[in-house]
Amino acid sequence: MQLSTKARYAVRALVELALKYGQEPVKLKDIASGQDISLKYLEQVMFPLRISGYVKTHKGSRGGYVLAKPPEDINLYDVIRTVEGSLSLVDCVDNPESCDRVNQCVTRRVWLGLKEAIYNELSNISLAELAEKQHLLYTEAEQ
Amino acid sequence: MQLSTKARYAVRALVELALKYGQEPVKLKDIASGQDISLKYLEQVMFPLRISGYVKTHKGSRGGYVLAKPPEDINLYDVIRTVEGSLSLVDCVDNPESCDRVNQCVTRRVWLGLKEAIYNELSNISLAELAEKQHLLYTEAEQ
DNA sequence: GTTTTTCCCTACTAATTATATAGAATATCT
DNA sequence: AGATATTCTATATAATTAGTAGGGAAAAAC
């Protein structure tokens, strides 16, 4: 059970965008090379985030990506759910009909609780908070 | 990001064992057929649980599996970690050396917190508790 | 000694994940 | 207008993981 690199890359990329919020668009190429991520993969990762309205893009030279909302208004649960599809660790949580044992099975309640725990943890972390901490780390590293 | 069926099967099987705790050994064949699980797969799933001392086995006819400890003393975190290896959703949580960006990357702290949230949720659920609820569900279903 | 079960090792298949390739569309700059 | 840089889209491929299946050895019960 691993969080996909897709989700991890998405978070890292959005933190970069949050750091540059209000400035000019950030090119995926820069993010990709700065973080050792395949550019082509990153393009695919960003796609659903654009569709869901978390980032905006500008084509052409001097183009790139910007956050579509203030970093305070984007939390990690939204980001990860957008690229991963769902944060349920077990199918039956979102699709009760996927298992005909739903009504006689205690474990579904466990998985439901687990999803909620993950939600509580992640929805509480905003890009703003992360960017701030990341900024500190970067400046520390320079010394 | 899905919990492996391995983990789900393990939990379901152990709940069955908890329901029969103190009685005679339960055959995997019965669990497998009762829950539509491949017997051969279930054997593999149970293997690490025996090694780690959560279940004991008896070979031969009238053999089978029993819990090695009272159901109160086995929690879901232990079970899942035993069959899944780890409940960290990201590698760098357990193996900082797996990523050379560890010290400049905020996201690791996020994944650490996430692991803890999952731990808090799952370690708090014992097989005894689950078995009790499962028992209720079964008797309800019969009516 | 026959049967039934766990035990162990291995191989196979299917599904998912991650990356790469190729080029179209669009904006910028000179 | 033309050259360049970027996002956008679709597809292909490689790598990894997940899930299943098979065959038989070992041990216990009857």
Image (cartoon, coloured by chain):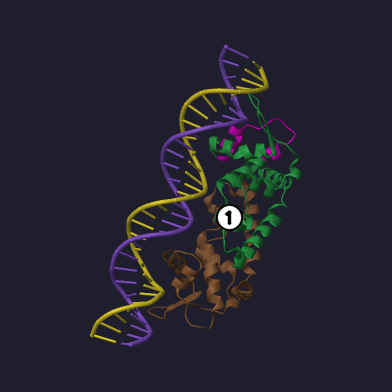
Chain colours: A brown, B green, C purple, D yellow
* Depth order, front residue of D16/A30: A30
The residue lying at 51 percent from left, 78 percent from top is A68
Q: How many marks?
A: 1
Chain under disc 1? A
Q: Which amino acid does the dot numbered 1 rest on?
A: Leu
Q: Quadrant of residue A29?
A: bottom left
Instruction: Say above or below: D11 vs B70.
Output: below
The answer to whether residue A3 is magenta is: no
Position in image of residue B20 (x %, y %): 70, 36
Position in image of residue B68 (x %, y %): 72, 36
The residue lying at 53 percent from left, 63 percent from top is A7
* Depth order, front residue of A81/A62: A62
* Depth order, front residue of A35/B35: A35
Circle 1 sits on which residue?
A89
Q: Quadrant of residue B39?
A: top right
Magenta stretch bounds: B15-36
